[in-house]
Amino acid sequence: MSVTLSVLVQTPAHSGVGGPLTYLSEEALPIGTLVRVPLGQRELLGIVWDAGHGLPAQGETALRLRPIAGVLHPLPALNPAWQALIRFTARYYQRSEGEVALAALPPSLRELSPEQLTRRLKRKAAAPKSKNTAEPLAPQPVKAVDRIPVPPNGLALTAEQEAVLHQMATQKGPFLLFGSTGSGKTEVYMQAVQRLLQAEPSAQALVMVPEINLTPQLEQRFRERFEPWLGAGCVVAMHSAMTPAQRLNSWLAAHNGQARMVLGTRMAVLASMPHLRLIVVDEEHDPSYKQQEGARYSARDLAVYRGQLEGAQVVMGSATPSLESWHHSRAASPDKPAGRYVRLHMPSRMGQSALPLVRRVDMNRQPRRTVFSGVLLDAMRERIGLGQQILVLLNRRGYAPVLHCPSCHWKSQCPHCSAFQVFHKLNRTLRCHHCSHTTAVPRACPECGDTDVRAMGRGTEQLEELLATQLEGVRRPDGAAPRIARIDADSTRAKGALENQLAQVHAGEVDVLVGTQMIAKGHDFRRVSLVAALDTDGALFSSDFRAPERLFSLLMQAAGRAGRDAQWSQQAGHACEMWIQTHYPQHPLFDALKRHDYPAFAEEQLQEREQAGMPPFSFQALLRAEARTQDAAQSFLKAVSLAAAELPGADRLSLYPPVPLGIQRVAQVERAQVLVESASRTALQQFLTAWQPLLRSARTQHRAVLRWAIDVDPLVI
Ligand code: ADP
Ligand code: ZN
Ligand code: ZN
């Protein structure tokens, strides 16, 4: 006798098939079971989803139903909490459950047949324990005898760390750990994990970091701490730079409960962890936690939701929290002193290392077109002479020179995008950073034939060269000329390049490191005593209302790179410094920075946002459309905006007129968007859910529209 099952599969985004499909099965299977099912000519991975009512299939429809192709028997079913997380994510971010659920599974799991999976698991079980791979086995009870019953020796905690851990032990959270760079937040995370595992040996912890680059450091610290206690395989990593096989192994180890700690990037928030009790979101303010394609979820926000759902404690840490999180940790009102988040504070840096002195250079008093002011150069020369290191931070993203012709004003416009191709001196190419279109540098201007085409604007490469000239004659203590290195997206494209470059900095082989925000994040450069930020002004008056928040956070992060080694900087007898070159030295942002006063900056920004009715005091979503012409994209958006007036929630929100995106055309595709804003999250959610079917049907009338997508809580508007 067969039963019917509802099975979730990965359906194309706009197929209209959002929900599960129905299949026949010889046996009733629990919800969450992984199965293989036929779809058309293909066979896909699926998840048993709705209660397959257990009824025998009857009548005509039963004839058309197809049986499932197999069951991934060795794997335990995905548990109800995970299912609820997927349901919520799909609903909140306006995507189908199938898309979200299947994207949350490791890609290679989608390809394995039940037989292949069984063979693989057997092989793994038979293989001797290797140091770097977790053993995916069928679910096993945790045997205490397997482990050395001595917890690791952590550091002796500071009073601030103790106080924070005490609050975590006695309150529910979620917690916002507001701690300076180098205040020992990572140590707090490790201690929290340790205390959890001592109390509950089978518990699991999820620790997220924003960047793949930061996972190896973190992984090493966790392994060194926990492997001697819990054995190899207790810590697994999860991020997109891993091979499919590694990802599968990590996922299986987390899913069957073997891995106690999962360290990963945003994707890890959807990992199946049946015994999840603690979630850490480090550098919670970082924009990388927001997924920028498919289901555009915020891993930070989902972490908070997931914690609530599964009864897991959530800690978000940052020296410069997002204004959203900061707002949630403020007193709701004088009579309600606790915010939604419990704020924990660790103001002191380890080892008495002071935060650097912030110095502003008024660029209005410098000759026009000055790149490095004289005072800054003098300070740099002195530091090099003392054998200290310098970071030069470039704020502008896509800091990039464009090729141009001075006679006819031709510029290296990308033929496919409304953007310029960027000049790369090293391999003499022009490259578009949006569509990757690459061409050789022309020998002469393609318009007028002038051979004097040149790079316009400063790129990191040019800056590096300029600096080399301006530091000519300066000597290190050993008499050698200073060495300048550059770290940016280009110099680190090759695998391992970033690690190599960072190792050189650590080894003291580099005196001046020039780079974009990549160099400001997380890396522990002990000998850096001077940080210089060159072009910060754009962010002060940007149309992007989040630009000041990002700038402040970047500068605080960068400042945190200096003076991490108190001994070093005091020995040299020079306080660490952060130099800011600006045309607006009086700007309140720099005042707050000078005092290292994030709370003051946050209060000022939140007041502005409240007055302007911007997030976190309102909720936003974007509807984006892509078409061959801007007109087609906009007329679709106009039509669906008009038709939306009667939808539930529509009376409590604003729909703005369609506008082209900042970069309007990419790879020959025109892009436009509509902003939806409401003071009520519920109204916005209600509206978006009701809007979806309307959007799907409108697209059949607007055939020129290639794609549309909704971005809930967008970070960039
Ligand atoms: P954060 O994550 O806040 O930037 P870390 O946890 O990386 O700070 O700590 C900064 C440095 O201080 C690290 O080298 C760490 O080993 C050290 N550290 C952390 N806690 C202590 C402690 N209680 N005693 C001594 N050193 C500590
Ligand atoms: Zn020309
Ligand atoms: Zn392009």
Image (cartoon, helix red, strand yellow):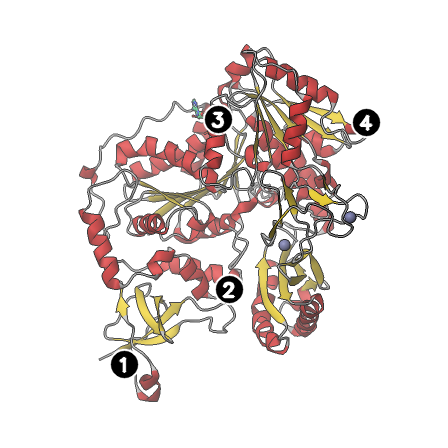
Let me know if residue 360 appears in the view: yes
What's the mark number on residue 56?
Answer: 1
Q: CA distance from mark 4 to mark 2?
A: 54 Å
- The amino acid type, in three-letter code, at marker 1 is Pro
On the image, numbered disc 3 is attached to which residue?
Answer: 504
Mark 1 residue crowding within 10 angstroms, few (<14) / some (14–19) / many (20+): some
| First-in-chain label (3 vs 2) | 2
Quadrant of image for the N terminus = bottom left
Q: Position of residue 666 (x, y in %)?
A: 63, 58
Relative image position of residue 151 (x, y in whole percent) = 28, 30
* Relative vertical location of residue 130 with respect to residue 579 in this rendering, above or below: below
Q: Earlier in the sequence, mark 1 or mark 3?
A: 1
Where is residue 555 shown, x and y percent of the image?
A: 63, 32
**N-terminal of the two: label 3 or label 4?**
4
Q: Nearer the viewer, mark 3 or mark 2?
A: 3
Q: Quadrant of ligand 3?
A: bottom right
Q: Secondary structure at mark 1?
A: loop
Which residue bears the numbered disc 2? 95
Q: SS of the residue at dot 2?
A: loop
Tell me the kind of residue under disc 4: Pro
Q: CA distance from mark 3 to mark 4?
A: 35 Å
Mark 3 within 8 Å of ligand 1, using the beta carbon = no
227 or 109, which lies in front? 109
Please say if the residues under marks 3 and 2 sit with CB atoms less than 8 Å apart: no
Q: Is residue 317 above or below residue 684?
A: above
Q: Quadrant of residue 97?
A: bottom left
Q: In the image, is 45 to the left or to the right of 568?
A: left
Labelled pair 2, 1 in contact (Cβ < 8 Å): no
Ligand 3 closer than 8 Å to the CB at disc 1?
A: no
The residue labelled by disc 4 is 367
Image side of residue 219 versus residue 417, left or right: left
Q: Give the distance between the C-alpha atoms of the residues marked 1 and 3, in whole angstroms.
A: 67 Å
